Image (cartoon, rainbow, N blue to C red):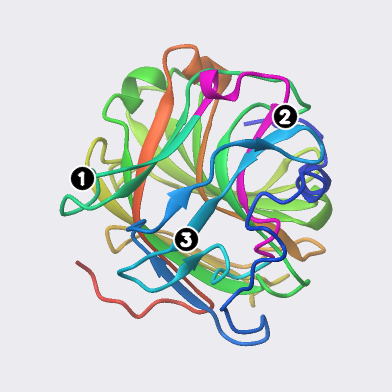
Amino acid sequence: MRSTTLNLALLLLTLGCAGQNSSTPTSRTPDSAPFQFRSGFEPATTVSGAHRSASNTWVESLQGRDGQAAFSWPGDLPGDPSRSGFFYLVDGDEDIRSIIETRIDDATGRGSTRALYQAVLKDHQSTASRARNQYSLLNSREDVFAEGAVRYWLKLQPNLKEILPAGSWRQVMEWREQGDLYRKAVMIMPDAATGEPYWTVFADFGPRWDRDWTAENRAIRVPLGEWILLEAYWKEGSGSDGRLLVKINCQTLADHVGRTRNQGPIFSVDLFKVYAAPESLALGPSYQWIDDVEVSSTLSNAGCP
């Protein structure tokens, strides 16, 4: 996948308050302390409704306290809650609901609970980047994302294989470095010979996105239309001190030990993301459900379901 040379980090920085209002108090401990967060999108968690940022692009946020997990969006998450949220990279003059859909659905999560639904309905480019539906944590200081882990349940659309033609891709998660100097991502691609979707984890040097390393996995299938457990642990490093570990249903998808940064620091962590190639969106919308999110500052010791 080739991306534009847009400095996305700078764009996100100028998009305005995608998360909670800066005057809203937060309950999370200071960034110097270990962090932990859990939510299943239960009441009173809500999607705020899309609004135009100061840069006239569409943004949205998750708000409210999950009554079961007792954590609040976005105040209990790491990073800067006043700037974290959904970023769509769609100009504010466009009809956002013809391009993006984000909502919390009742009785669609695991065990008939609530779940977050994200969709990109069609390919669109009204800014320097293409439309995507991503929930991004933006940093509050340089080292807040130096190490962290995320674990959640993901259900991909059942027809994903049919809308992934040769040469296309579908991104699930991404980490971006300040100034777009480096990125890491989890992606699904179609096998050139069989068309079967497979997992790939990679890192690129920006802003031209020249590949640094790749870890492909065709042995662990890409389940479609069913709930799967996605876990990722990262530690920033310029050599053997760096690590990116990704698991699917407790099976190791990739475990890269080596460089995970260029000049640092991580500017944004896209926890859950729907970002698809134009060739894919030409065949239909790209969408997914998310449930039971956990974010922490260290590798999870939680058992397998």
Q: Position of residue 204 (x, y in %)?
A: 69, 47
Say whether residue 194 is visible: no
Position above or below: 51 against 176: above
Residue 140 placement (x, y as % from top left): 74, 69
Q: Are marks 1 and 2 in contact (CB under 8 Å)?
A: no
Asked whether residue 155 is drawn in magenta, I would say no
For label 1, the residue is 107
What stretch of residues is rendered in magenta?
Answer: 80-100
Query: Residue farthest to the top?
Result: 282
Task: Please identify the quarter of the rendering in which residue 74 is found.
Answer: bottom right
Which badge, 1 or 3, comes first in the chain's sequence?
3
Quadrant occupied by the C terminus: bottom left
Q: Is residue 182 left or right of residue 271?
A: right
What kind of residue is marked 1? Ala
Residue 68 locus on image (x, y percent) = 30, 69
Amino acid type of the residue tagged 3 in the rendering = Gly
1 or 2: tag closer to the N-terminus: 1
Q: Is residue 141 left or right of residue 87?
A: right
Q: Position of residue 36 (x, y in %)?
A: 48, 77
Q: Which residue is mark 3?
A: 64
Name the residue at 51% across, 24% down.
168
User: Disc 1 to disc 3, how far (Cα)?
Assistant: 19 Å
Mark nearer the N terminus (2 vs 3): 3
Task: Return the residue at label 2.
Answer: 129
Gap between marks 1 and 2 measured at Cα: 34 Å
Kind of residue at badge 2: Ser
Q: Residue furthest left?
A: 111
Given residues 297 and 234, the one toward you in this image is: 297
How far apart are the alpha carbons under marks 2 and 3?
30 Å
